[in-house]
Amino acid sequence: MTTQAPHPKSLANGASALVLGGGPDDEREVSLNSSRAIADALEAAGIPVIYQVIDTPTAAQLKAMGGDVVVPVLHGPFGEGGQLQDLLEQDGRPYVGCGPLAARLAMDKIATKLAAARIGIRTAPAGIFGGRDDHNPHSPIELPVVLKPIHEGSSVGVHLCHTRSAWAEAIPQVRADIAHHPARVYMIEKLIPGSELTVGVLDPAGPEPQVLPPIRIEPAVEFYDYQAKYTRDDTRYTVDPPLPPGGKEEIQRSSLALARELGIRHLCRVDFLLDHDGRPWMLEVNTMPGFTSHSLLPMAARAIGLDMPRLCATLIGWAARDRRAD
């Protein structure tokens, strides 16, 4: 496990990248910003780019878009939860990111927590929210808890419940959201007070995985919500912050182990909460992290000398390498 910048693996002369952005999910706007940033970075690296904004394309539509390697920069259940990956497997071209099975496992927060527990990584108690239970005035997990969708990212639909009154206020909002999004399932998770940390992992399934330095996230508001992640400028980020002895090594080791357990390739970001006793608790895994101006994986990559053009070109190279190896 190294934290040195990888050597970029360039495409053959004349090869092009098809960068996809958009999608049908709540994180569409973030996807558009991330995909545009990646397209610009690839062009800066000298790689020809075909940029396409999509919704839910068919296999034939995807094939007609051209390009030699596909970079699917979509956030949310369709784009990073397996459905788009099914189309990409059918398409046959190399593509950046994990395959359909790993995408589905990592998008499912409960499945991710089970995988973490299976290999001894600390994660908070959690369970499925019984949305059809009309007699649930009490949380089945001792307060404080978090109510959140199992298959969403970017803090979509998250409710912090410190008190019984907060729990009671959240329940009808969650039920209304489920009624509006029938496929959406919620979970209840014990809220661990502390600070949030995130660790980027590059090429976890490859011969020389890169575990990036952790970043401490300190939002100006109580909760690191959508606005704090993407629009506010008062969230503080500390790259490679001071941690308790052994803490950095533990979360880096855990991040790589979990990525491998889930079968993730090329890139991911693993989020943790560091409690007041200095113990890390795994929260979730993101297999297509943001690449916006506020995004954390590119920020950590820059700290080891890996700028956006080189990072994006390297991802393209790994995708081409893995398709050749199939």
Image (tube, rainbow, N blue to C red):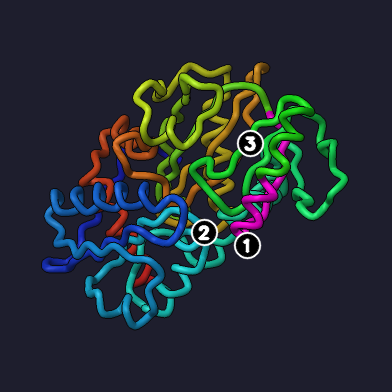
Q: CA distance from mark 3 to mark 1?
A: 18 Å
The disc, 3 or 2, on the residue closer to the chain's N-terminal end is 2
Q: Are marks 2 and 1 in contact (CB under 8 Å)?
A: yes
For residue 225, say whether it is visible: yes
Left or right: 103 with respect to 297?
right
Q: Secondary structure at mark 3?
A: strand
Q: Which mark is residue 183?
A: 1
Left or right: 104 with respect to 19?
right
Depth order, front residue of 204/301? 301
- The residue identified by callout 2 is 77
Name the quarter where the C terminus is drawn. bottom left
Depth order, front residue of 251/80? 80
Q: Secondary structure at mark 2?
A: helix
For the record, the magenta segment spans 174-191
In the displayed structure, would residue 134 be above or below residue 222?
Answer: below
On the image, the x and y values in percent for residue 150 come to: 63, 51
Q: Residue at x 28, y 46 (%)?
A: 311
The disc, 3 or 1, on the residue closer to the chain's N-terminal end is 3
